Image (cartoon, coloured by chain):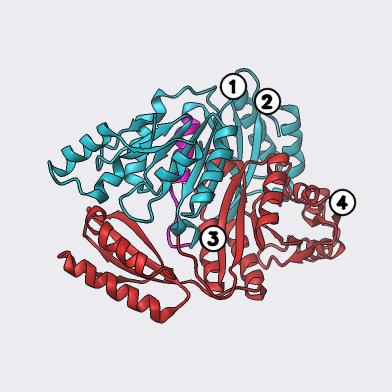
Chain colours: A cyan, B red
Amino acid sequence: MPEETSAPAVTAAVLIIGNEILSGRTQDTNLNWIAARLTAKGIRLAEARVVPDIEDEIIAAVRALSGRYNYVFTTGGIGPTHDDITAEAIAKAFGRPLIVDAQAAARLERHYGAGNVSPARLRMARVAQGAALIDNPVSAAPGFRIENVFVMAGVPAIMRAMVDGIVPALDGGPVVLARSIACQVAESILAEPLGAIQAAHPAVDIGSYPWFRGGRFGVSLVSRGTDAALLDDVAGEISQMVRNLGGEPVDEDST
Amino acid sequence: MPEETSAPAVTAAVLIIGNEILSGRTQDTNLNWIAARLTAKGIRLAEARVVPDIEDEIIAAVRALSGRYNYVFTTGGIGPTHDDITAEAIAKAFGRPLIVDAQAAARLERHYGAGNVSPARLRMARVAQGAALIDNPVSAAPGFRIENVFVMAGVPAIMRAMVDGIVPALDGGPVVLARSIACQVAESILAEPLGAIQAAHPAVDIGSYPWFRGGRFGVSLVSRGTDAALLDDVAGEISQMVRNLGGEPVDEDST
């Protein structure tokens, strides 16, 4: 696969924590949303994992991902109930004590009212020692950042608000842009000329994604890279290829 | 976390292969669908990963997952275009040559017509040596099984047909059943009594999943385990707990 040249890529991983995703009860949408935000910021999402609510699994995954990528974003398991074990697992992953953060406790007291921060609620003020809080404008209980790991809620509305508070301040690399041309030529027909276009443009990464929509089969041919002018050229070549094969190229918006 | 007792669990992992998932272009739905099918069969989905179309990443993930779980299901990257590199990566992961399977080639010839199996189409007949084919009733090009890894298409309609052909014949363990009670009591209020119910029933795994639907916050309290009568009892205790807290328990269907 061709890699973009120039400045080094900034990479990230997403770690989704939750039995409900692995049992099939819940359709995850957080990964897709985070991926789009990171892509727009010039941060390349290089891997994602889903693990159950089992401490050793969380620890192993956080360590593996944290050591390998610039940033790690976790979702899930930071609420007040017995099955919310993420904060403790993250602290253990970094060999830090789990502490009640005074500022986090103050935020909870402001949210619930003085004297209303029960032990269960206070669980949501626990962070790995040395962590920085992540704002939660939806329901107060913060996430936290420890080293290169951002520990966030799993509820999409809260997770999204947290990401919107985090990502603008991160260092990104060159933004990977995309141009997508759809057509109804079979992949097996366009494979050879498309491969030739790919081979001629190693700085662009061309993907072929078949789809089935409203009773019609088709394929989206997506060119990705950091050079907008080059992407326009490649998209032009792909459109011409589609026409040469008797198809009708359709410009698509794409990330 | 409590684990079900009795017969040993049969475990699986899903490996999603594709840049389009990690760029945010495509919302994956395959994981959720496979998860529900496995759960119904008594196979516990223990982990999922998403990796890009990079050979070394695919090889490393397949080896890690194959060594750890009973079954691995991969989706994506087995089409005819240059970016379809899964078959080759899987063969390398197991140290096997990549060969053109005669039976797969015959299926393609039947589908496309004699003389119409171009080199690009023949790519879709390549499997790791010693693999068994996975039927594709949608578009002919088969997946394959090598050792404990099932290599499947990424297009949902095709992937689903493949899974429906595979899973009924697999050995499953005890089926994990679920009972879900929804309510609008805040998690931080029910956390303590819910934790007591969990502590009293180590053979049941109780999860608390907050949600926000149609302008209302609530939480689903999901009990999972292999003993249906015990689950009924626990769901009853949870319902009573909700009433004791002034809430209204609502039975939900759940996986």
Distance from Cα at disc 1 to Cα at disc 4: 38 Å
CB within 8 Å, label 2 to label 3: no
The mark closer to the camera, 2 or 3, is: 2
Earlier in the chain: of badge 2 and badge 3, it is 2
- Please state which amino acid type lies under the numbered disc 3: Gly
Distance from Cα at disc 2 to Cα at disc 3: 35 Å
Residue B137: percent from left, percent from top: 67, 68
Question: Which residue is identified by label 4?
Answer: B97
Question: Which residue is identified by label 2?
Answer: A203
Which chain is mark 1 on?
A
Distance from Cα at disc 3 to Cα at disc 4: 38 Å
* Mark 1 on the same chain as mark 4: no
Is A188 colored magenta in this rendering? no
Question: Which residue is identified by label 1?
Answer: A227
CB within 8 Å, label 1 to label 3: no
Which dot marks residue A215?
3
The mark closer to the camera, 1 or 4, is: 4
Looking at the rendering, the stretch of residues picked out in magenta corresponds to A24-40
CB within 8 Å, label 1 to label 2: yes
